Structure formats: structure tokens, C-alpha cells
Amino acid sequence: MVKKLLAAGMLGLGLLGLGGLAQQRTVEIEFWTYYLSPNFDNYIKGVIADFEKANPSVKVKWVDKQDTLERDLTAAIALGKAPDVVNLWQDSTFAAAQNGLLTPLTELTTQAALESAYYPNVLSIFTVDGKPYGFPWYGWVDQGVMMYNPELLAKAGVDPNAIKTTDDLLAASEKIKKATGAYGWLPPVKDPNGASFLGRFFLEGLSIYDAQGKANFNSAAHVALLQKYVDLMKADVIPQELLRKEAFQLTNELYSQGKVAIMIGGPQSLNRVKESNPELYKKTKVVAAPLGAAKVQTGGAMDLVIPKASTKKREAALFASFMTNRANQVKFANVVPIVSTARGSESDPNLRPKDPNDPIEVAKGMVSGSGRFINPGFKPPKNTDDIFKNFNDNIEAAFLGRKSAKQALDDAVAFWNANAK
Amino acid sequence: MYVKRRALTSTLIAYAFLAPALVLMGLFTFYPVIYGAYLGFTDYTIADLAAKEPPRWVGFANFAQVLGDPLFQTGVWNSLKYLLVVPVLQVASLAVAVLVNQKLPLMGLFRTSYYVPVVTSIALAAVMWDWIFQKDGFLNWSLRLLHLINWEGRFSWLLNEHTALWAIMLVTFWRGLGYYMVLYLAGLQSIPAELEEAAVLDGANAWQRFWRITVPLMKPTILLCSLLSTIAAIRVLEEILVFTGGSGGPLNSTYTALLYVYNKSWGNMLDANFGIAGAAGLLIALVGFALSYLNFYLTREERGGRS
């Protein structure tokens, strides 16, 4: 009996083995995205189908990861089952590349090919120690456009077209708060991720590093800028809740309730307003966003990376470059207002607004092709987590009045320079 | 001989029944715990994992580094402060259990209401408490109605370094009350009614009955609940993550010991340092052991004295 069972088992295994041989010509790669399912199932599945049609020897297994992406990636690599194409973003690509988890793309394609396919400014976001690690995918701009509640602005006597700089915006916020009780604009000063206040310095043309790469954001001008925001928070022109919540999230929440008058950012900010307050959405107007003294836009992008542990790197690179090519990014921009990072998108005829009366469409027309302006601002330091934590703690201490602005920045610079490995 | 064999058989059967649970626990609890403890004595980061380098033994170096890190010290101090929620929670749960153990109408409704927070997801609870603690939130509004605060000087409870930890402890209290109440209720219902009746006949008043009958008979339950609640308090993390986004702010006033471990590993996975996280985790486990022992010791001694 036992023998018979064993024999049957062997036969089964043998057949499986043969089956494997017959199918060996098709390679299956695993593709991980971040928070894209179920909202964009149709789009992603469509692109995968197009790819498989053009490359019949490659099958793509799509897995959408959410909060646990980084952990699952590490676990999969440790178990020897690494996915082949993974959706990361600036900070995670930086950390993963520095720790040797990723394949430099120049092993699979040339720098010239990458530069001709993507905006170089975006490619540089994913370049770590001189090597590119990510195929640039969908992006966003932090300034993008200015979306506002015209009733609140009218009540405060603020002319939206006169808001050209961040200083104008802050002055308008003060007026709006005084006249209506609603906040004007909520600047990111201490978002839970990253080190937002460095972005404020950068936008105003203030340095983060000196020529030797040492942090130097504690000059009198830096101190004055931080002090300005501290004073605004003390006067409740900007809410204290910004120390605890992401500005983007808080803005979305309060704008829909009519408690914030102005949103600065990409058109995706309007999606939630459209859902939670359709009336206000219809009234919302869109104009060009004001910029800081440096006259630059900041922003970021997602990318597709290939783990070093992937065993099908060639197919992975083929798929990643297909997913991120201009045609597919422009298609994506028409599904959801993202910024395409593929070179030449600014003149792509498919990125024009379809309905001039719909706020999202108008905003989309203004920003979808603005990938060439995406500027990450500055490179994160090594030992990012500890340094950003310390920076944020110091900024928080200044806002809560436990340290002077100068003391806070001096302490942050000292810690930064002592700990950036 | 026969008896011996029968004993052996029943032992084997017992092990056979235990085996599935033991195997699962071994795989998913004991092995990770032991391996995590081992990592505490090694230098092992995400870069080593990527390069397939094995952990390198470094003895107590990680422990020295962790103990010398001001952030970890702050974390331990805050976790110890968090323990203050334990006695308050236990006394309140026992009191509520005694109250809902009365045979009065609508008791089922009360029991259910106290239990609702236990089954409420933390994400949902966070939204509600967030609104309660805000500067213009429900708590400040209620305090104003009661003329307990100066409205102009009001602040957000989660953004003041003197109140944030207490505010989060209140949420833990709210979430734990129903859970421990149910455990106490089960204990209360196992007390024979005759004892109470006899005490009533002897002329004991309600307080005497509670203190002389209920409390001594409930001692095992009290020990269990205090133990569970102490361990939960020293390991608090979920509440901190949802209320502070993992920053432990304001000014690290809610930065707990386990948040340190989390931020050195899971929280920043692509930059993880498993050696440091392992060492910090082991130190917290030691504190947990010490507190558990203290719990046993205190309850045992009293019981011994009484008998």
C-alpha cells in the first residue's frame, strides 16, 4: 500500500516536473505596487495586458501592497522570494539603495537611454551615489496650483490673482483668519514623514548644505523664516494641529468643511472635496500657485525599482520601462491627476483639460505636463531617520515655545553634522 | 507494569493534543523570541541582510548603546509612567463589574455598552478621541461648560507635553475597561451565592461583604488582570502610533520604549538595525519580567498571610 502511494506520488511529481519544462519559455515576474488597488485596477491590468501581448514570453503577476510594503519587501528578500519590480519613492529608494537592496539600472540599460526617456530632474531624485536606481513613475508637484474657496476670499477682501509669492499667501491668510475665522493656507511645517521645514527653506532660496556638504541652515535668514512661522502659529493664523498631522491631510479635511480657504498642491487634493462636499467643489476656483523667493516648484515621484535579489532582472527592466513610458504615464494622468515624469509630456496632446468648467480638469491641464519642474529640493542625508527625527523635534520645540528659533536650528545643525554618516 | 503503561499512554495522548499548539507557538512565538534575543547580541542591519552577511556577535555592545541613548531613556521613563494606568484601570474595572453584576433591569445593555470600546477598531477610536482632545474639541468644550478652564488659555491635549501622555492613557483606560470588566464579571459569577447569603445572615454590610468575601475570592482574577494589564502597558505602541504618527511627540513626551524598538526596525524597515532593536526589545522584556514577578510576589504574600 505504502509503495503504491509512493509510486503515485512520484508520478505526480514527475508530471509536475514535465509541466514545468513545457512552460519554461514563459517567465513570470512579480510586480508590487503601493496603494493602487482597487482604485486603479482597470488601468494597471490594462497596461499589464498590453505588455504581455507585446512580450508573450513574460507573464506579470501583480500584487498591490499597502502599509506593509517595506516590511514585506525585506521579508521576501530574506526568504529568497524577492519580487522583480517594486514601486518605491524617494526616501525608500534612497534607504534601500544605500543598504544594497537594489540593482543599479545602468547594469540593465544605459544612462543615455534613461535620460532620453525621463526628465533628468526626476531621474536625479532616484540617483544615489551617482547611480540611477529607479525608473521614474508618476509624480506630483507640491505647489502645482492654487485652489480656493471664492466666498471666503471675497469676504476677507483678498484678490486671488494678487497672490504671487509665499509672503503674499501668508499675508492673505492673516486677513482671511481675521475676517472669516477660517484658516487661509496650511503650510507643511512638520509632516510626520520627512523634514518639511527644510522644504520651506529651500523654496525661499535658503541653503540646506554648504559646499562641503555640511548642514548650514542656521543663518540669520533661516532663523528669521522659522520665527515668522512660529509667530503665525502663536497668532493662530496657522493651526497648531500642523505639528501632529500631515498638512495635506488636514487641509483636505478642513477645506471640505469650509474651515480652510486655500489649497496649494496637485489636483488630486480636490478628489476628496469632490466626494465630501460637491457643492463647494463646484464653486472652487483654480489659478497658478504662488511660489517662494527661489521661484521653484518642489515635488516628488514614485519609481519602479528592481531588487538586487530578483532573478529575472532583464524581464523586470523590460516591464518597468514599459509601465513608465510616456504613453502609459499619459494614460494614467487621464485616469487620475498625476504628473507624468516621461520626457516630452509637456507637449503631449492627450494632457489637455477636457472640460474647462470642472476644477479637477482645469488643474490637471495646468500640472499634468509639469514634470520638468519637479524638484525634490535637496538630497536627504545618510542616517536619514535619526537626523530627520532630531530636526523635527527641534522645529517642534521652537513652535511650542520651548526653544528659541535660533537655538532650535543651532541644535539641529549640530546634531545633523555629528550624525550624518 | 500495566498502570505504568497506562500512565505513559495518557501522557502521550496529552502531548498529542498539545502538539499542534506547541508546534505553532514554537514556530511563531518561541523561535522569533529566541532569535530576536540572539540578534540583540549581534551587529545585524538591513545592509547585512541584503548582502547575505550573517549576524556578527558583538556581546553587550548594543545594550551599552541603547542604554546610553537619551531617546531610549525617555522611552523607558514614559513607559513606566504609562504603568500608572494599571491600578486605576483595575480598580475601575472591578467596580464596574460589581455594578453590572447586580440583578437589575437593563444590565445586559450596560454590560454591552462597556464592552463596545473593546471591539471598536483603534483607527475609528482614534478619529473620535482626536476630535475630543482638539483645541476646540469636546473635552475643552465640556470643561468650559463646567467652568473648569479658562477658554482663552485652552490647548490641544495631544499637543501639550504635559498632557499628551495622560490623554493617550485615558484612551487605553477606555479601551481596557470593558475587557477587564468581563474577566472580573466571570470571576464574580463563580463566587457561590451561599457565601454572600450567609454573610448577610451574619449581619455583614455591603462593604464588609465586598472586602471580606469578594476581594479574597477574586484574588486569582485580580492577579491575572493586573498581569495582563501591566504587560500591555509596558508594551504600549498602537495608541502612540495612531495619535502621534509614530513621532512620539510633542517633544517626545509620548515616546515609549517599544516605539524605540519599532522605529529601529519595523517603522523604518529599509533602514532597519535589527541588533539595536533586538537589544532594546530584550531590555523591555526584562522590565516586563520584573514587573510580572512583582505582581505575583505581592499577591502571593497577601494570600499567604490571610490563610
Image: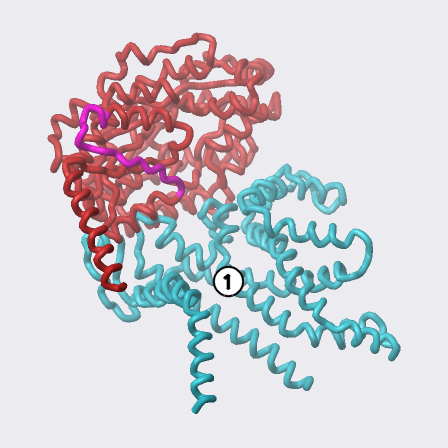
Q: Residue at x 57, y 40 (%)?
A: B127
- Who is closer to the viewer here, A391 or A112? A112
Q: Residue at x 42, y 77 (%)?
A: B12
Q: Is residue A46 left or right of residue B234?
A: left
Q: Is residue B286 shown to the viewer in this render?
A: no
User: Does residue B148 show up magenta in the picture?
Assistant: no
Image coordinates for residue A223, horizontal then vertical, percent = 40, 37
Q: Is residue B189 above or below residue A109?
A: below
Count the numbered circles shown: 1
Q: Residues within 10 Å of mark 1 (few under 14, many from 20)?
A: many
Q: Is residue B92 left or right of residue A229?
A: right
Q: Which chain is cyan?
A: B
**Splitting the image into 4 quarters, where does residue A135 fall?**
top left
Q: Is residue B146 left or right of residue B39?
A: right
Q: Is residue B256 above or below residue A369?
A: below
- Who is closer to the viewer here, A232 or B263? B263
Image coordinates for residue B74, horizontal then vertical, percent = 46, 59
Q: Is residue B4 shown to the viewer in this render?
A: yes
Image coordinates for residue B18, horizontal then vertical, percent = 45, 70
User: Does residue A63 show up magenta in the picture?
Assistant: yes
Task: Tell me the element at label 1.
Answer: helix
Which chain contains the residue that carries disc 1?
A: B
Q: What segment carries the magenta color?
A: A51-67
Q: Residue furthest bottom?
A: B1
Residue that badge 1 annotates: B234
